[in-house]
Structures are given as structure tokens and as C-alpha cells.
Image (tube, rainbow, N blue to C red):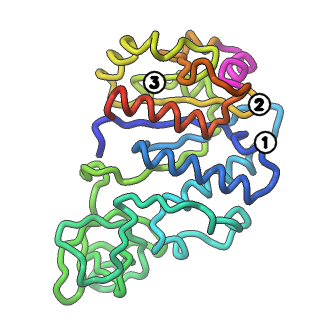
Amino acid sequence: MPQKKIAIAIPASVVSDTPHLREKTSKIGLIGRAAAIFRVIQIIVYPDDPKAKQESEARLIGTLLAYMETPQYLRKRLFKLEPELQYAGILPPLRTLHHPLNRKAGGLKIGEFREAATLSKTDEGTLVDIGVEQPALLRNLQLPKGKRITVTVAKVNGRVEVKPANREDIQQYWGYTVNVEDWTLGKLLKNGDFELTIATSKYGVPFTDATEEVAQKWKEAKTILIAFGAPARGLYEIAKDEGFSLDDVAHFVVNTIPNQGTETVRTEEAIVATLAIFNAQFRF
């Protein structure tokens, strides 16, 4: 896995300004692509409006992001025909390493990692779908049907066999996880799971003025959270409504798009701009 574990936090209202499910799906697709391009390993969806019921919007975001991250060959096995997926066909492909194009058992290599879905138990172990024309055997381990696991190819001659793998041992980028949280922004920033927390805001310190300080903390941190605001309210407003000071809780509050030419910057645009700048500056 990448040395730095980068997580982003996005509000449940990120698609609230988009009325139609098709456009909501398209916007979430942009966020998923940006996360994968810049090797984000976790996307956290947090509630940002205590006066609104955001469960359905949060579920939509979580479902579509998780669907995007799942290899195409496993989607029908792991997802039901849910209303949220009506326009899933317009989601852009991630084309990450855990979405392999090879669908032939003969093209597998020993030691290759694959995402798998469990199919059925046998006396020898568990049959799993790894995206080729025949199920692979996970020997000496019986797992329930419909479970997603990461495996490595152990045998390719004759029956394909695989072994369990730890995603932490995979050196390449292997996709992101999605967490739909009940925790508010304040709790996310305060809980101590991240060694570095960065909030983004047009009222923050211009990134060029904070680069050296951020760079020093970035160098030391292994777990980093970058938080983004909502279409209607920025992080300062969200923090004020929750009753805490954003400057006191986040390690840094930065403006990554100083002198913006538009009145507002959409969340998905801010994600791309911010991650691009951090990636170029810190080589994560």
C-alpha cells in the first residue's frame, strides 16, 4: 500500500444541489475517479446538516462509491438491483490495478492479487469468483456465500487455486473503502484516528503561505484526513453550527484555490484541485 494513507471526508449533502438521480450519479462518479487517481484509501461521508434527514443521500453516495470501487466482474454478485444504481451505467471505470482486464485463467500469474467473491463451500474449502471463466479454490477455508475477500493466485495449472491476502501487503494502490458515518465533522476531526487533519475553505490560509508548515507535518504523518465542505455551506459554517472552532480542531485550514474566478467552487472541483496540489507538492 502507499506509504501515506490519505482519507477524504465529504458531506452527505454533496449532491443536494443536484435534483435528478442521473446527475447525482455523475457527480459521485467524478468524486470516485478523483479519489482513485490520487490514491485515496478511504472516503468518509459525514452528516453536515443536523436539521435535515440525510440518511437517503448518504446511502446513495456510499452505495455508488462502493459500486464504483468494486471490480466489474463482482458487481452482480455483491449488489442487488437497488434504486440507487438505476444510472450506475454512466459511472466512469476506475481502471485501477484491482480492476484487471484479463478474464482468462490462462493469463493469471502466480502471486497475482485479485478481489474475489465467495460462491460455495466444498470439502476442500471455498469456491470463489476471481473474474476468470472458472471458479478458483480457496483451499482449507470455508466461508459464507457472498463475502468479498482479497486473494493471491497460488496455482494456475489445472484448477486455479488462491490464498487469502492482506491488502496491507499490496504495494500498489488497491482502491478505496467507503464509510458512511454517524459522526459529525467535529467528531471526525477530534477522534485522533488521523495524525494530520486538513480542512479546506476559501477563508483558510492560502496554501502557498502554509506550504512549509504543512510539509513538515505531512512528512511525519502516516494517516491524513482532508475534509471538504458542502455545496451550500463551507466547513467554517458547518463547524459553527456544531459549536466548535474549525481553526482549533483541524491542524490546518487552507485555501487551495486562492483568487478563484467563480463565486463558489463545487465540492467535486475542490477535491480534484486540492488533491492535485498536494500530490504535486508532497509526492504522496
State the SS at label 1: loop
Q: Is residue 227 magenta?
A: no
- Mark 3 Cα within 10 Å, few/some/many (few <14, many 20+)? few
Whether pointer 3 and pointer 2 mark residues with C-beta atoms closer than 8 Å, the reply is no
Q: Residue furthest bottom?
A: 158
Distance between mark 1 and mark 2 Cα atoms = 8 Å
State the SS at label 3: loop
Q: Is residue 118 left or right of residue 253?
A: left
Give coordinates of residue 213: x percent, y percent: 38, 11
Magenta residues (range): 234-244
For the residue marked with disc 3, what is the amino acid?
Gly
State the SS at label 2: loop
Quadrant of the image occupied by residue 261: top right
- The residue shown at (69%, 36%) is 47
Whether pointer 1 and pointer 2 mark residues with C-beta atoms closer than 8 Å, the reply is yes
- Mark 2 Cα within 10 Å, few/some/many (few <14, many 20+)? some
